């Protein structure tokens, strides 16, 4: 077990109840190690943003505590926040500011002296490709430009911990791709917590996941563990070759013991295996049949995103637990 | 060959976040429509009233002392400014909640620094603006009612009157900022503050001398401008205002550092 001082973020029984009306977060205990890229998952209202705001000290916990870099986070813990870079879901900027004035303002909020902040902000504006717009009012920026500016603002203090709340929200394909590439690059030197609804993004850039549902943490661990919880054994094959040969091979595949379903639609074959079936062996037999019938295999894919499926399974399972949820914490631990 | 990058240890300036928020708030307040409306209305109302009185004085031959003319204008200025000063004070923190406050308070600034910067910025804006407006009125009165001013308006009295009103405005701004920091919306904050302001004004009216009721203080302006004021009472009033402002700041600091944003 890692030593306590190694954790970047540590929470213990973290609970947030808003004005005795809404339980936003319920008894969340987790720890995040350096270098971890944590994907924070959960449906709307699951408590993701509340959790992030508690880590930042923007909210005060109703019960429990948050430690960041082994020190208690509080609304006055400015020293701790100097080591954090944050992007809110929909970043808001003071009216009338330009990227230069805004980044200068943010750098001053971190207490960076002029000889440090001025070169830094110039470098960042260039890096996020806002140089041609560095003198324009932010109010006229597109969502993509706003997102890039928010990224620059979150990096200006060279933080050790990055907390990005839905960083790809509202971005077009190109901007989203750039953002994911940036996250991958940053992941090599910083600890990241990324809240996202987009499971394919989390799948691509994160190595750990935390799933929240209705304020309760229902999973925390590596992404591999999350994926390992399900084995759907559901595949699709795109085939090529003589139609009769394909039909014959499908007949043969249906005859395999562990194949529960094999449906052919034009030249696409959908195959389901038994839940507990070791897939490698059956797939080897299946490939052999295709080869015997001289059928060419064009593509093969696992149906559905594994992370997405695992996430949906987790949420569904949690919903179906009823009062057994009382024992959730013990089981999760 | 790669040049080895020297290890740079960045020394943070702890007061820089305070200055950043202070300067930015000052700049944005001066650009805000509430502030512009306040200055415009105050300027137009004062100019109009002064010119009207000059007209009465010169054309109709109605005589009124310069101090009386000036105190009437300043009284209008105070009463007229009150509504917009309340809006300026309450909106200092509550106006940013849920929008830009996140992007400020998630950086290296403590709640204390943020509150102090906002409080000081609004204090400076309101006090400096009122002092400037009142100084303009005093100067204009001095020149427009020149014959009477020599015998009537006093420089010390004028300074004392402006200082007293600024001190009272400081109390209003301090409690306004505090209430804005402790309420969830600007509208709620303004409503609560107006009720508190009217309530305390009404209570002070019921109290006997030497309690400073708003009516008595406004009525005394005339004499203050002539230089007739009790310096001991005035010191007490200034100290009382300073105490109330500091109390407001203390309540605001503690309350705001315990609240969610």
Image: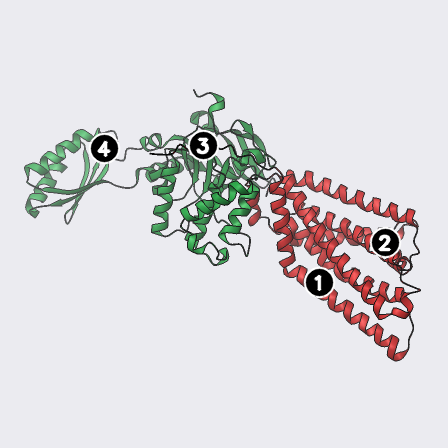
Chain colours: A green, B red
- Residue B254 in percent (x, y) is at 69, 38
Instruction: Report the residue marked by disc 3.
Output: B6
Determine the residue positioned at 40% across, 44% down: A197
Q: Going by the image, does A39 lie left or right of B131?
A: left
At horizontal 70% and vertical 42% (from top left) the residue drawn is B252
The percent position of residue A63, horizontal first and vertical second, equals: 58, 31
The answer for which chain carries disc 4 is: A
State the CA–CA distance, disc 4 to disc 3.
60 Å
Where residue A99 appears, as percent x and y from the top left, is 49, 52
Tell me which label, 2 or 3, sits earlier in the chain. 3
Tell me the chain of label 1: B
What is the CA distance from the residue labelled 2 to the residue labelled 4?
91 Å
Residue A216 visible in the current orientation: yes
Q: Residues within 10 Å of mark 2 (few under 14, many from 20)?
A: many
What residue is pinned by disc 4?
A274
Question: Between A7 and A307, which is closer to the camera in this rendering?
Answer: A7
| Residue receiving disc 2 | B160
Mark 1 and mark 2 lie on one chain; the one further toward the N terminus is: 1
Q: Which chain does tag 3 point to?
A: B
Pinpoint the chain carrying mark 2. B
> Dot 4 surroundings within 10 Å: few (below 14), some, or many (20 or more)?
some
Q: Residue at x 22, y 39 (%)?
A: A235
Frontmost residue, A259 versus A152: A152
What residue did someone put label 1 on? B39
Give the SS element for disc 2. Answer: helix
User: Marks 1 and 4, Cα distance to the nearest angstrom?
Assistant: 78 Å
């Amino acid at each position: 077990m890692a030593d306590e001082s190694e954790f970047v973020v540590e929470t213990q029984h973290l609970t947030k109840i808003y004005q005795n009306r809404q339980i936003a977060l319920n008894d969340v205990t987790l720890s995040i190690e350096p270098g971890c890229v944590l994907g924070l998952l959960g449906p709307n209202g699951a408590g993701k943003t509340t959790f992030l705001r508690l880590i930042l000290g923007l909210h005060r916990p109703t019960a429990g505590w948050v430690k960041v870099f082994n020190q208690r986070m509080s609304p006055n813990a400015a020293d701790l926040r100097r080591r954090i870079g944050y992007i809110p879901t929909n970043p808001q900027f003071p009216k009338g500011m330009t990227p230069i004035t805004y980044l200068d303002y943010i750098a001053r909020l971190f207490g960076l002296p002029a000889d440090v902040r001025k070169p830094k902000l110039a470098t960042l504006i260039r890096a996020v490709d806002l140089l041609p717009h560095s003198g324009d009012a932010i109010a006229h920026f597109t969502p993509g430009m706003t997102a890039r500016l928010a990224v620059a603002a979150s990096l200006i203090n060279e933080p050790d911990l990055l907390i990005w709340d839905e960083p790809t929200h509202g971005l077009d394909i190109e901007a989203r791709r750039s953002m994911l590439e940036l996250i991958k690059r940053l992941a090599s030197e910083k600890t990241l917590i990324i809240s996202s609804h987009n499971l394919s993004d989390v799948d691509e850039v994160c190595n750990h996941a935390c799933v929240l549902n209705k304020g309760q943490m229902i999973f925390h661990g590596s992404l591999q563990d999350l994926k390992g919880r399900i084995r759907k054994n559901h595949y699709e094959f795109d085939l090529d070759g003589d139609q009769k040969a394909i039909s014959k091979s499908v007949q043969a595949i249906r005859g395999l013991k562990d194949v529960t379903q094999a449906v052919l639609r034009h030249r696409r074959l959908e195959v389901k295996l038994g839940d507990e079936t070791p897939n490698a062996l059956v797939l080897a037999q299946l490939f052999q049949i295709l080869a015997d019938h001289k059928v060419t295999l064009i593509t093969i894919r696992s149906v559905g995103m594994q992370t997405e499926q695992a996430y949906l399974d987790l949420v569904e399972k949690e919903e179906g637990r009823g009062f057994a949820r009382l024992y959730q914490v013990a089981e999760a631990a | 060959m790669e040049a080895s990058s020297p290890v740079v240890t960045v020394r943070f300036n702890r007061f820089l976040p305070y200055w950043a928020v202070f300067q930015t708030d000052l700049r944005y307040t001066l650009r805000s429509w509430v502030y512009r409306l306040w200055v415009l209305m105050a300027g137009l109302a004062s100019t109009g009233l002064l010119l009207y009185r000059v007209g009465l004085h010169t054309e109709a031959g109605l005589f009124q002392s310069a101090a009386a003319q000036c105190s009437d204008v300043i009284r209008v200025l105070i009463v007229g400014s009150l509504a917009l000063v309340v809006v300026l004070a309450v909106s200092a923190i509550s106006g940013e909640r849920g929008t830009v406050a996140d992007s400020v308070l998630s950086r290296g600034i403590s709640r204390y620094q943020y509150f102090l910067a906002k409080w000081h910025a609004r204090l400076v804006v309101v006090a400096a603006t009122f002092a400037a407006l009142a100084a303009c009125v005093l100067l204009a009165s001095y020149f427009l009612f020149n014959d009477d001013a020599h015998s009537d308006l006093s420089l010390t009295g004028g300074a004392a009157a402006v200082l007293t009103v600024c001190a009272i405005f400081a109390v209003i701004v301090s409690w306004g900022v505090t209430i804005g920091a402790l309420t969830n919306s600007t509208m709620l904050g303004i409503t609560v503050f107006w009720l508190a302001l009217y309530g305390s004004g009404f209570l002070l009216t019921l109290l006997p001398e030497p309690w400073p009721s708003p009516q008595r203080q406004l009525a005394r302006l005339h004499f203050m401008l002539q230089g007739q004021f009790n310096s001991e009472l005035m010191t007490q009033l200034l100290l009382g205002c300073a105490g109330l402002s500091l109390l407001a700041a203390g309540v605001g600091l503690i309350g705001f550092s315990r609240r969610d944003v």
